[in-house]
Image (spheres, rainbow, N blue to C red):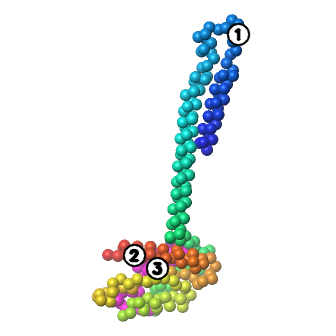
Amino acid sequence: MNLGRVVLGFSGACAMGAFAAWAFRPAPSDPAPEPMVRSVQQRPAARQARPLCQALSSLQDEVAQLQQVTEELERAIAAERFTTAAIEGTPLEWPDELDPRFHEEGVEAALLDAFEEIGGGAVVGLDCSEFPCVVVVEFPSDQFEEPIAAGNQLSVVLQDRGYDVWGQAQVIGNDDEEVWAYLPTLAVMPPQGTRGRPDGEVLGKRLTFRYRDLEDAVRGSSP
């Protein structure tokens, strides 16, 4: 229901009621009624309508103010959504009829197989809440002589098995410390040209945000 229209309707009725009270008051006749009686008979509707008209006018002003506030809030929400999309990109839907190996269970299985081939590695973060799956993998220096080389080898193995791999990497610690780790953050997805896969620009903007978001979650959960 549009409250503004209801208030306007009552306001119109109020005006018509006042007019009716004036238009249909009894015409004087001969002999004229006593003044006190005439006053009581002529204006009771108008006297009763005046407070109601004032109340309805005040309510109409309040409704107009509420409508203005609502419009301002809607504009602010729209601006915030636009800003968020410009920074974070837009969440990506999973393509229809996508091969299950590109979903969470398939990606986990592919990673475990790849770890066996390269001699180790561990998943420390995985996000498949939207397309594509993003994973943070750890290669510690106490398990690998060349952790960075192992991370690069992981990408090669996954690509050989039909996955497209995008990503970035970070190093925790440095080679002066007793143990340090190489943590690549990878998007594991179907090859370019797969039906339903977004174009590079859209995909890249969203993945840049998701890499950082997952890396922050991994660091926050670390002891």
Give residue 97's position: percent from left, percent from top. Answer: 62, 76
User: What is the three-letter code of the residue carrying label 1?
Assistant: Ser
Nearer the N terminus, badge 1 or badge 2? 1
User: What is the three-letter code of the residue carrying label 2?
Assistant: Val
In the depicted structure, whether residue 215 falls above or below residue 62: below
Nearer the N terminus, badge 2 or badge 3? 3
Q: Which residue is disc 3 drawn over?
A: 135
Magenta residues, as a range? 118-144
Q: Label 2: state its secondary structure.
A: helix
Give residue 128's position: percent from left, percent from top. Answer: 50, 74
In the depicted structure, whether residue 71 falls above or below residue 198: above
Q: Are marks 1 and 3 in contact (CB under 8 Å)?
A: no
User: What is the three-letter code of the residue carrying label 3?
Assistant: Val
Q: Residue at x 62, y 15 (%)?
A: 41
Q: How far is mark 1 from mark 3, CA to CA?
A: 97 Å
Q: Which residue is disc 2 drawn over?
A: 218
Residue 29, label in figure = 1
Q: Is residue 35 left or right of residue 147?
A: right
Quadrant of residue 124 within the rendered picture: bottom left
Q: How far is mark 1 from mark 2, CA to CA?
A: 95 Å
Q: Residue at x 60, y 38 (%)?
A: 7
